[in-house]
Amino acid sequence: MQSFINFVAKYKEYFTLVALVILSLSFISLGDVSRIGGFRTVVIGTVGWMQSVFTWIPKPGALQSENKSLRQLNLQLSTEATRMRNAVIENKKLREMLKLREEQELFYIPSEVVGKNIIELRNYLTIDRGASDSVHAGMAVRNDAGLVGVVIGTTNNFALVEMIENRDIKIAAKLQRSGIDGVIVWEGGEVFELKNVPKAYDVRLGDIVLTSTFSNKYPPDVPIGKVVEIKEEPGNIFKTISVRTFVNFGALQEVFVIKYLPNPERTELIQKMDELLKLRKGYTK
Amino acid sequence: MKIIFDQKGRKSQVRSIINYAIAALILSVVNIVLLDFIAVGTLTPDFLLILCVWIAVTEGQFFGIIAGFLCGLLFDFISHDVIGTNALAKTAAAFVAGWFYKENKANITIGSFRFLAIVFVCSLVHNMIYFFFYIKSTEISFFPFFLKYGLATSLYTTVFAIFAMLVKLQRKGG
């Protein structure tokens, strides 16, 4: 026993080393630091607090590193700023292009009303713009309030406008709120009538009436008027809807010719269909 | 008379242990809190390792490996490292440092360039063990990593061991 004790005492460094290495490896094998639990949390908290106490001391290395990071960030931001500027210019150009497109679709030619004619319940206007101003027959006319009529004839410097207060006028129209389609007609009264709207459809007083995309004569979405009366008569499957125009036809002084012509192919097709129908009616008779 | 001598020796030993413990605590805090100020890139000196070498060279191998283990464990706790890695590395480093222990000649050893060489060798042993566990769970090759970081860290630690050497030289001179 004594010899064993002497042996251990003689090589105590090695025994201690082996014991401590085993102990260290055991700690390492624990691996998961969370097993140490609350004690380490306290230690880390304390170290964190101590580190925060010394944060006021400048760190040359950290400053250098921060400078480097900031320079990189600055470069990135500068690149982004250049991109943004380019995007703004591009956006402006695109907007201008869009605006141009809008203007091309609904390009307005301002003109003054120089005369008014009423022929057999057909109201006409004479305006001071003609063929030399690129005004052609078939172009719609409006003012700031809404639809006025359509150009039916031109000279070099004047044009004749058939107002929608005209018994021959039939305008494909729609209600702005619900999108319900109908046909606007004028029967000589103070108000227009929106026809072909079934009783079941949702129409309310005050609904705005616009020109429809179904119209081959007028550009779409030009304001016409608003619903002022709705009637449902027995024996009629359609509503009787009265529409008051936005335009005060009695006080027209300035109008705009909408540089918009109906699609000729579409017009031709409609004309052919009309002729065909007339022929059929003739055979039937 | 002999008893009085033993009591004096024990008191002196206890005082040394307390001094070493305080030094270990201070160096741990410095190592953790103020290391950012002396770090060169990712390289940092290991003050606790210098202390362990000092203890092993001054007090002997047995005392040194216990000090190494305790210092390593302390560092593992206050750093966010895996518990046991620093303890193992510093125990081994202190064991190597203990081979250079010569009774009553510690002052000469520490006050000379020999101490720097010991610190460098011990630091290499320390870093070899530490980085082995450090990259164990990664796909990093050990030797290139060790040559890049282990060697550089050892050199940087050795540079700071110069201050310990100078302190001892000044005491000797005084």
Image (spheres, helix red, strand yellow):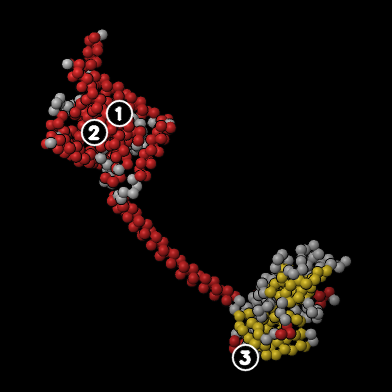
Amino acid type shown at disc 3:
Asn
For residue A219, above or below residue B30: below
| SS type, badge 2 | helix
User: Residue at horizontal 73%, vertical 83%?
Assistant: A249
Residue A274 is situated, as x and y percent measured from the top left of the image, at 74, 76
In the image, taking residue A63 as reference, residue A175 lies left or right, namely right
For residue A47, above or below residue B94: below
Q: How far separated are the C-alphas under marks 3 and 2?
A: 107 Å
Residue A91 is situated, as x and y percent measured from the top left of the image, at 49, 68
Q: Which residue is mark 3?
A: A156
Amino acid type shown at disc 1:
Leu
Residue B35 is situated, as x and y percent measured from the top left of the image, at 29, 42
Front-lying residue, A36 or A25: A36
Checking the image for residue B70, the label placed there is: 1
Q: Residues within 10 Å of mark 3 (few under 14, many from 20)?
A: some
In the image, taking residue A45 as reference, residue B25 lies left or right, namely left
